[in-house]
Image (cartoon, rainbow, N blue to C red):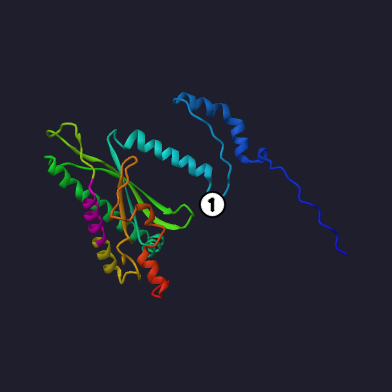
Amino acid sequence: MARPSSPPCYERHRPEDTVLYRTLEGHLEAFLAGASAQGGGLVVAFSCKGRGFCPSCGGRRMSELAAQLVDRVIPQVPVRQWVLLLPFTLRYQLAFDATLTSAVLDVFIRGVFAGLPRAAARAGIADGQGGAITAIQRFGSALNINVHFHARVLDGVFRRPAPGAPPVFHPLPAPTDEEIARILQHIHGRVMGRLRRRGPPARGAWRSRSGGRADASSGRVRRRLHPGVPRHRSARRPSRATAAHRRRGGGR
């Protein structure tokens, strides 16, 4: 008869036996003195020792990057968020192809920037320069593969009033639905062109009207690209026509 196994018991880790512990123990005072001499600091211990997602390490890097962008990169001017959502098949392609991801991002930012000179010209501003920072988000809220782009674009242009003078920011009016649709058509054509040069595009990529979506929002403003198709439905729900087509056996 097999003997019952003993229940697992907790075995304390012994950090005091590690090289890191002994190093800090011997030099902690000097380390803290050096940090104070450089303007002060906050000592935080991280010991996840994991190979996956670490909330502590990820949160720390996220906070550091956000502080860097807010304090040293993004000027104190109005900023508009542009979001580019992609068809499901193209999302999978981008998830495993960094070169294609960079190419689509380049097309996206150039397409947004292409509308700034026209808006500036209507306001009587010539030779204006814009700016943007983009975050590539690879997952959805359910950790599903969903490569899409969040771009923080200056809501206007900078222009030097005279050679050598500091640039002055000129705000521009919000884009209209027609302008957003024009920008999306530009992005659609350029991305399709790049896919054709790479080979036959994946089946279903950019096939439907609601497959690719662009949105420009500032604060709580939400704009709809197509009448009757709210932005928040574009990434999760198929259109009624697509659902009916699937029920008739036209697709899966």
Image position of 9 with respect to 185: above or below: above
The image shows residue 164 at horizontal and vertical percentages of 15, 33
Query: Which residue does the numbered mark 1 point to in the structure image?
Result: 52
* Residue at 31% across, 41% down: 218
| 145 inside magenta stretch | no
Label 1 Cα crowd, 10 Å radius (few <14 / some 14-19 / many 20+): few
Viewer-nearest residue: 9 or 21: 9
* Residue at 26% across, 60% down: 188
Viewer-nearest residue: 168 or 17: 168
Type of the residue with mark 1: Gly
Q: Secondary structure at mark 1?
A: loop
The image shows residue 147 at horizontal and vertical percentages of 39, 56
| 180 inside magenta stretch | yes
The image shows residue 196 at horizontal and vertical percentages of 27, 69
Image position of 97 with respect to 232: above or below: below
Dominant secondary structure (helix, strand or loop) of the stretch shown in magenta: helix
Question: What segment is highlighted magenta in the picture?
Answer: 175-188
**Quadrant in which residue 156 is drawn:** top left
Q: Residue furthest bottom?
A: 249
* Residue at 57% across, 26% down: 29
